[in-house]
Amino acid sequence: MSTHWIFGGVRLDSFGAVTLLDDYLDMPTKRSDNITIPLLDGRVFAKKYFEQRTMLFGIEVFKENVPDLEDTLESMKLLFGARTQQALTNIISCSPGIRTAQAEVQGNMGVVRDINAVSARCTITFVLTEPFMRSTIMAPRPAVSLTSKLISFDNGSKEIRCTGGCGIFNAGGGETIYVSGASHPANNATWTTASATANKIVLTASPTTEAAGNNITVCTHLIPGPIVQKINLSPTYYPIVNPGTAEECKPVIKLTGPLTNPKIINLTAANYYGGLFTGYVWVGYMSAILVGHYVVINCANFTAVDETGANVVGNIVHSGAPSFMVFLPGNNSMRVEDDIATTGLVTVEFYPPYL
């Protein structure tokens, strides 16, 4: 396994050997405190927030001669002296993704060298105003997979019939699935589900009719990207997985009509904020979104705009957390309620945060 660090598009080990990584594997410190109430013992718990963090890197530079060494140090000054934030990226060879954060170099480079020496030791301090390293890949929707010899296909009703259970596919449909292993090539393809029950998946297009008995695998696509859920039932239940190690408070949520008074509820995040907030974390849009129209809720900026760019944040209500919506690390059980529940969509996008 190897680890590489890139800042401002330049690999740090292009200057020399990275000899020190401090605070990279530690957690950022927390800020705020519990609440003191007069005339009562102890304190009332309050959720803490992570402070900005610092990462200390040591770089040892070796060159053939003194002019080359000093040229390299000048190049480092050019990179680290920028008075702005730049991307600090971590690449781990065995990791399933790349993680990045915005960082600024503060202080000097701490250069230590002997006169006329062809090597120097430098210490670089990065400050991350947001203390998380985020994956560069969007969080995927959890995959569902079924392998069975007792699956049949029916062209007329557009059904996949499963003896012994189909798995937990979305009852309201809207999932992209891949069917493989069937004897007919037409079945080795991608389909969209219209609905599902315990023993039946209805597709939006007709498969080739096939009797039970073939070894077939049916699975949802595990493709990182927007998590799209059709809301043709109220309530609609579905999972959202945050594979990171920190709660996600900055997702982007897109509501595509037709929807009327949609309410998105995180059942897993109930009472997560202790004594300050109680109940589920939820966000709602208290108005109608017609067919062909949509609203984008940016939880990082606390904004909501429609497809024309008009500000519609006045229709937003939320409760349970300071943020519009929170996804805890791991599985989050979601419930969406809507007054009409026909063909509207809820789309969620976020890049998982890591401590």
Image (cartoon, helix red, strand yellow):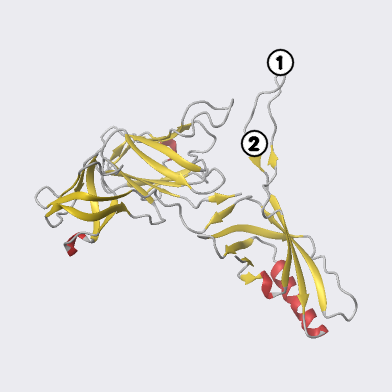
Q: Is residue 308 left or right of residue 80?
A: left
Residue drawn at (60%, 62%) of the image = 90
- Per the image, the residue denoted by label 2 is 48
Between the C-alphas of marks 2 and 1, the distance is 21 Å
Query: Tag 1 or tag 2, which sits nearer the N-term?
Result: 1
Q: Position of residue 101 (x, y in %)?
A: 60, 57
* Residue 340 seen by the camera: yes
Pointers 2 and 1 in contact (C-beta within 8 Å): no
Q: Would residue 158 appear left or right of 240 to someone viewing this image? A: left
Q: Position of residue 26 (x, y in %)?
A: 68, 50
Graded by Cα atoms within 10 Å as few (under 14), some (14 to 19) or many (20 or more), the crowding at tag 1 reads: few
Q: Residue at x 56, y 31 (%)?
A: 273
Res. 81 visible in picture: no
Q: Is residue 194 above or below residue 234?
A: below
Q: Is residue 174 left or right of residue 239?
A: left
Give the residue number, with chain letter if any, for mark 1.
40
Q: Give the secondary structure at mark 1.
A: loop
Residue type (three-letter) at the residue carrying disc 2:
Lys
Q: In the rendered view, would you say 115 is above or below 135?
A: below
Query: What x and y, as percent, mark residue 124?
Result: 75, 63
Dividing the picture into quadrants, the one containing residue 290 is: top left
Which class describes the residues within 10 Å of circle 2: few (<14), some (14-19), or many (20+)?
few
